[in-house]
Structure formats: structure tokens, C-alpha cells
Amino acid sequence: MSRNHPNHHLSLLKYLLAIFLVFVLVAVVWCAFSKISSTKPAHTSKTSQSSSAIIPKTKESSSASASVSAGVAYAPSQEEVAYLKQRFADLSAVNPEVVGYIYAPGTMLDEPVVQTSDNSHYLDYTFDGSYQPFMGTVFMDKDNRKDFSDSLTWLFGHARGSQVADHRMFNDVNFYDKQSYFDQHPYVVLETPSRKYYYEAMFFIVVPETTAFYRTSFDSKEQFAEQLNEVAKDAISKKADAKADANDHYLVLSTCREEDTTIRANLYLRRIPDDEMNAFVKEHASQLTYQATR
């Protein structure tokens, strides 16, 4: 028995050493796990802070953001297309020379627009074809493109005033000579067979009937800019922050003045560019609503 005692102690020592090593290993693993676990919240917090600053984008939101920054061509909705199809089917049934329909919310201006081969016929003939001097129909200059794609498009109409009982057509255009009226009625809507266009009033000017401003084309953007600058300089009423830009498209509503038959009142309207259209319609929807006066 005395010979086996050292071996017994040796075995016991090995057993205790093994247990100690197991405890050490467990302690190392536990410490490592604790360290990893403690670093996770900090990592998550950093990611969260980064996300709130950068705002991760889905494919859709990224595309929308790019659209806002780069500008997107306006596309009419299916509802608008269907509405215009029916609208112009009805108008064309009455007069096939119709090219548009114009109205200024808050005013009596609410008229179909036609174009024919001369600038005199519709001074005396109404939209339905009846002969009524001083009534007539709003018409586009014969030299303008009927899709309103020119830099400067002219529409002419009577200011019936005291001549007839019906005061619509371009009678209210003359009221834009008052800055207060100008400011209260800033927008005009133009419907065409393919889409709607929105315009903002920029300048109101009174000129001689023979003014050189009556032209439908220009040799250059610089030449167009010169005319716009001249109009802006002589305007009786104008938009507060109006800046003439030859890259814009303008629509001019031209009519007579009762106090002098040799002068004309011209209201210059700037078309809202397609890349501004969606934001414009959203912001000013309540000021663009059609209210029939016919």
C-alpha cells in the first residue's frame, strides 16, 4: 500500500489540474462572450445615428428624390386624359377648329379657343358659328402653332364691356391693370386635347394697336429676351418678383380698351415648366379649380 500512495497523489493532482484548466477555459470564453455582447449596443447605436442622418433610401424613395432634384417631365393622369378626351369631343362637335379651353379662376374668363386661317373671322363669329359682332370667339393667332409650343403664343378676344350684356371673354383681362386685382387672380389654366397647362400672370401692359410686340417668332433667344425685358419695363402691373426668361413659354391675352379703340391691353402669362408642374399643382390646387361661368 505504501508503494501506491505516490501514484494516488499524482492522479489526484492531474484531476485537480484538469478541473482548473476547465475553469480557466470557461472563464476565458465567458469573458470573450461578455465583451462581444457589450460592444453590440454601441454598434447598433452608431448605425442608428448614421441612419437618421443619412436616411436610407428604398429604390422608390431614391428615385423620387432624384426626380425632385433633376426635374421630371409632366405626364397627365389617366383621369385627366379621359376628361380631356370627352371635353374636346364635345367641343369639336360644335366647332372642329377648337384648339383649347381657357379659364382664370375667380374671374369671368371661361372660353373655348379656336384657330383658323385668318385673324378676322372670329372677331364677328361665335363658337357655334353665329354672326354676332362684338361677341366673336377667343382665337389664336393664325401663325402660332396650335399645340401652344411657341415661345410666344397670342390669343385675341373682345372686351365686350358696355357693348353687349355678356361680359365674359376677355373683358376681365382689363381688370389686371389694377395691381390688387392682378395679385388676387394670379393663375390661368389652359386645357388642350392632350393635356393641361398652367400659367402665372407676369406683366400687364397697354400698347398701341400697331405695336411691334405683335410677333409670333424670334430669330434668337436673345431677341425674345429683349422683348420680354421691354414689356417688363413698361408694365402697368406685374408679379412682384417677376424675372423675364427667354427659355420660358409665354401666352398673351390681348384685348381692346373701351376708352380708346386704338390701344390694346396685353396680359403676359408665363407657363409653369413641366419640371415644376407637380409641385405647383399640389401647392396651388385650391386656386386652380374650374368654376363655370358659361
Image (tube, grey):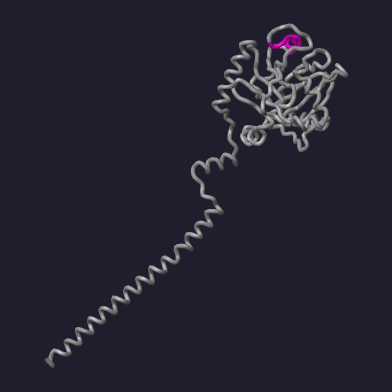
Q: Which residue range is magenta in the image?
A: 119-127
The reply, left or right, for residue 161 in relation to residue 90 is: right
The number of discs equals 0
Q: Foreground: 80 or 115?
A: 80
Q: Is residue 3 visible?
A: yes
Q: Is residue 18 within the magenta segment?
A: no
Q: Is residue 120 within the magenta segment?
A: yes
Residue 153: image x %, image y %?
71, 23
Q: Foreground: 147 or 16?
A: 16
Q: Quadrant of residue 219?
A: top right
Residue 79: image x %, image y %?
56, 25
Vertical placement of 23 versus 45: above or below?
below
Q: Quadrant of residue 255?
A: top right
Quadrant location of the N terminus in the rendered image: bottom left
Vertical placement of 176 versus 127: above or below?
below
Q: Which residue: 72% across, 25% down? A: 104
Q: Is residue 226 visible?
A: no
Quadrant location of the C terminus in the rendered image: top right
Q: Foreground: 186 or 219?
A: 186
Residue 228: image x %, image y %?
76, 30
Vertical placement of 259 versus 39: above or below?
above
Vertical placement of 55 versus 138: above or below?
below
Give the farthest residue toward the bottom: 2
Q: Which residue: 16% across, 90% down? A: 5
The reply, left or right, for residue 83 in relation to residue 216 is: left
Give the farthest residue toward the top: 131
Residue 197: image x %, image y %?
65, 27
Q: Which residue: 60% across, 37% down? A: 71
Q: Quadrant of residue 130?
A: top right
